[in-house]
Amino acid sequence: MKTNKDKLVTISVIGEVASPTRPRNLRITHEGIPTVYPGTGGITYNVKIGDPVFGWVGDHIEPGVSVKNKDENENRALQLYTCIGNEVRVTGRSEAQGKKGIVTGKHGGINHILVWFDDDTLEKLAIGDKVQVKARGQGLEITELPQVKFYNLDPDLFLKIGAKVKNGYLEFPVTQIIPPECMGSGLGSETAAAGDYDITTQDSKTTKKFKGLRLGDLVFLKDTDNTYGRCMKKGASSVGIVVHANCIGAGHGPGVTTVATSITGKIRPVLTQNANIADYLAVGK
C-alpha cells in the first residue's frame, strides 16, 4: 500500500490539562432522573483505553487526561491538527516534565483532546500542566484509493492497524458494525476533522448488541458519510474510534471520532475481536 506519509507535515500544538467544569448542578438521565455523576475533563485515573464503555458511574467519561486550550483559536488548532496516535510530551514545570503519552481521542462539544499516559505519569500530572503534541496525520491518503478520505489518524497507527486494499476496496478491521440510525449527538457538524459523535444507547434492545464495546475500539459506521461533516447516506461507509464512555442523556452514548470515510462505499469492514488501539499501541491496562 502506497500512502503520502512522507509528505505529511508534523507541527507542534500545545494545550493544558483541563479542569472538569459543571455548567449545571445536576445531570438528567434520558429517563428523567437527576444525578451528580462525574463528567468530562481532568485526569481520570481508573478509566483507560481498552476498558468497557458501559458500567461506569459517570457521564461522557473521558479516559486518561483531558487537554484543552483556554484561547479559542489555539484550541481550534489543537483540535484540528491533532490525530489519534500522535506523540505527546509534558512540558513546563510539571513534576511529569518530559514524560510522553499518546493521543487516543478527540471529544467535541467541550473540545478536548484525550491522552494516554502511564500510571506513574498520571500521579505526577496536575490540572494546568502543559502538554505539547507532535501533530501529524490530517491529509493522509492512499495513492491507489483516493475515494477514501482520512481524518484524525496518525499514519504510523494506520499502518499498525493493518487495513488492506483489496479489489478496489479498503478492508478495515473493526469490532462492531453500527447502523446509521444509532448515530446521534454530533450529526450535522461542518467537519469530521475534529471532535466526535455518539452512538445512541437509549434503546435497550439495540444496546444489547453493543454490550462488548470498549474504549479504543475501531467500529464500522454503515451508510454513513463523514466527508464534509457527519450524515447518513445510503451506500457510504466510515470507520471511527470509540473515544469516550457511555452517556446518560437522550441522543448520546459512546463517542466515535472519524478516521476514514468513503462517500462511494469503498471501505469494507472485517470483524476482528481485538481491533482496538490499546492493542495496536500497546497501552491501557
Image (spheres, rainbow, N blue to C red):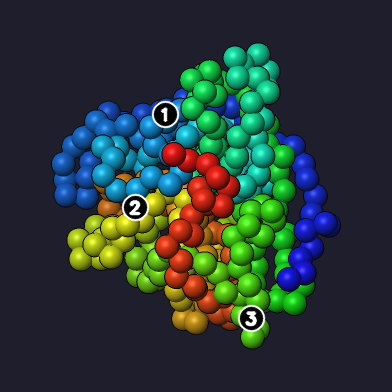
Query: Mark 3 sits on what residue?
Result: 166
Q: Position of residue 24 (x, y in %)?
A: 31, 31
Residue at (59, 27) in percent of width and height: 16
Kind of element beneath mark 1: loop
Q: Is residue 27 above or below residue 265?
A: above
Mark 3 or mark 1: whose residue is earlier in sequence: 1
Q: Is residue 271 above or below residue 121?
A: below
Residue at (68, 47) in percent of width and height: 81
> Where, by quadrant of the figure, is residue 56 drawn?
top left
Depth order, front residue of 193/266:
266
| Residue most extreme to the bottom | 167
| Circles 3, 2 touching at the beta carbon (< 8 Å) | no
Residue at (26, 61) in percent of width and height: 207
Q: Is residue 49 above or below residue 234?
A: above
| Residue most extreme to the right | 7
Q: Position of residue 46 (x, y in %)?
A: 38, 32
Q: Position of residue 121 (x, y in %)?
A: 54, 24
Mark 2 or mark 1: whose residue is earlier in sequence: 1
Query: Mark 2 sits on what residue?
Result: 253
Mark 3 or mark 2: whose residue is earlier in sequence: 3
Three-letter code for the amino acid on which mark 1 is drawn: Tyr
Three-letter code for the amino acid on which mark 2 is drawn: Gly
Quadrant assignment for the C terminus? top left
Q: Position of residue 45 (x, y in %)?
A: 41, 29
Kind of element beneath mark 2: loop
Depth order, front residue of 148/163:
163
The answer for how far apart the CA atoms under marks 2 and 1 are is 21 Å
| Circles 3, 1 touching at the beta carbon (< 8 Å) | no
Q: Is residue 101 above or below residue 200?
A: above
Depth order, front residue of 55/74:
55
Residue 281 in view, yes or no:
yes
Query: Mark 1 sits on what residue?
Result: 45
